Image (cartoon, rainbow, N blue to C red):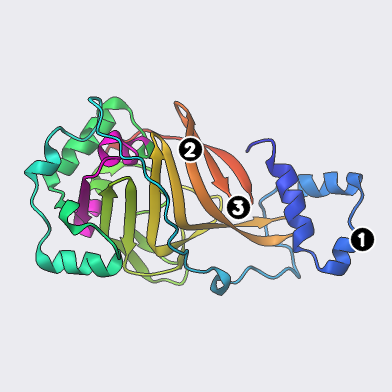
């Protein structure tokens, strides 16, 4: 966790109090104790209500300028792959147009199993992380690839790769969920689920529970840099109880670590390479 987080948590603690309580804010010494307590993500504190999931809105579509960068020679995406692939069938394109309004259908090609295998195997051979793979130069140009839900699950079953957006799972209330389609390219990633605004336990990140929008919209800001829209994490903070933070950005800061930016502060997390199972 970065050095600015304790101060952020202290500010969050004060913001969460009623106005009358904020007027009687603790002394600097008291804040120091609160900072230390807030750093402990443990059991809920009796008497403090959880943040209701109904209060988490579906993220609005926010246009983000995307630099159109041609694939580099070191791209994980094989040269000429997009041109060799067919367009999705008419029914799939119609469905995508409903799920992703404004999609440039002419730029979309249906990813083949061989093409996906070439990309993932190259990432594994290079020791690249999932963040490296999904922000690869081959996805920052104008070409867009569509992966069916079945193909996404096949690749996630075949390769070990930690992700905020798992291919499938079960919600906290026992409902199965799965990715039904993924678009990557044109500087964007759209992860499409069969449920919307669902909460689940992510075994790759057991520090809390997560909520995903039905359409997790991510902008590739550069190599190892993703702007995220549609992911929330819920943690238990001593004194505050349950706290919900919106994940806003993932930025690679070193060979094996990334900075996770949220609306409640930043945390440094390890990056793990893509590995074939």
- In the rendered view, does 271 fall on the left or right side of 20? left
Q: Is residue 88 above or below residue 160?
A: below
- Callout 1 secondary element: loop
Question: Residue under circle 1?
Answer: 24
Residue at left 40%, top 69%? 196
Q: CA distance from mark 3 to mark 1?
A: 25 Å
Query: Which span of residues is magenta-colored?
Result: 132-153
Name the spot of residue 238 as percent of width and height, x first.
73, 55
Dot 3 and dot 2 residues touching (CB under 8 Å): no
**Count of numbered badges drawn on the protein:** 3
Dot 3 and dot 1 residues touching (CB under 8 Å): no
Asked if the magenta segment contains residue 114, the reply would be no
Q: Quadrant of residue 43?
A: bottom right
- Is residue 57 in view from this perspective? yes
- In the rendered view, does 218 fall on the left or right side of 75? right
Q: Residue 12 shows which numbered tag?
A: none
Q: Is residue 265 above or below residue 128?
A: below
Badge 1 density bin: few <14, some 14–19, many ≥20, Cα 10 Å:
few
Q: CA distance from mark 3 to mark 2?
A: 15 Å
Question: As rendered, which of 236 and 215 lies closer to the eye?
Answer: 215
Name the spot of residue 135 as percent of width and height, x first.
35, 39
Give the quadrant of the C terminus: top left
Which mark is first along the chain, 1 or 2?
1
Question: Residue under circle 2?
Answer: 251
Which mark is first along the chain, 1 or 3?
1
Give the quadrant of the N terminus: top right
Q: Quadrant of residue 182?
A: bottom left
Badge 2 density bin: few <14, some 14–19, many ≥20, Cα 10 Å:
some
């Amino acid at each position: 966790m970065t050095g600015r987080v304790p101060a952020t948590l202290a500010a969050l603690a004060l913001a969460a109090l009623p106005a009358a309580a904020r007027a009687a804010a603790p002394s600097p010494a008291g804040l120091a104790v609160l900072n230390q307590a807030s750093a402990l993500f443990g059991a809920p504190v009796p008497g403090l209500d959880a943040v209701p999931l109904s209060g988490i809105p579906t993220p609005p579509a926010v246009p983000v300028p995307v630099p159109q960068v041609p694939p580099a020679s070191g791209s994980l995406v094989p040269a000429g792959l997009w041109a060799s692939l067919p367009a999705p069938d008419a029914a799939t394109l119609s469905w995508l147009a409903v799920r992703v309004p404004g999609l440039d259908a002419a730029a979309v090609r249906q990813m083949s199993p061989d093409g996906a295998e070439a990309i993932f195997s190259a990432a594994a051979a290079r020791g690249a992380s999932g963040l490296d793979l999904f922000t690869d130069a081959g996805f920052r140009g104008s070409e867009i690839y569509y992966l069916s839900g079945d193909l996404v699950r096949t690749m996630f079953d075949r390769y070990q790769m930690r992700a905020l957006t798992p291919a499938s799972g079960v919600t906290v209330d026992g409902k199965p969920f799965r990715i039904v389609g993924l678009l990557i390219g044109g500087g964007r990633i759209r992860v499409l689920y069969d449920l919307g605004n669902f909460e689940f336990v992510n075994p790759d990140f057991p520090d809390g529970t997560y909520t995903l929008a039905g359409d997790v919209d991510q902008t590739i800001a550069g190599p190892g840099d993703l702007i995220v829209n549609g992911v929330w994490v819920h943690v238990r903070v001593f004194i505050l109880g349950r706290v919900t933070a919106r994940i806003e950005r993932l930025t690679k800061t070193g060979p094996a670590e990334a900075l996770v930016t949220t609306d409640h502060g930043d945390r440094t997390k390890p990056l793990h390479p893509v590995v074939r199972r």
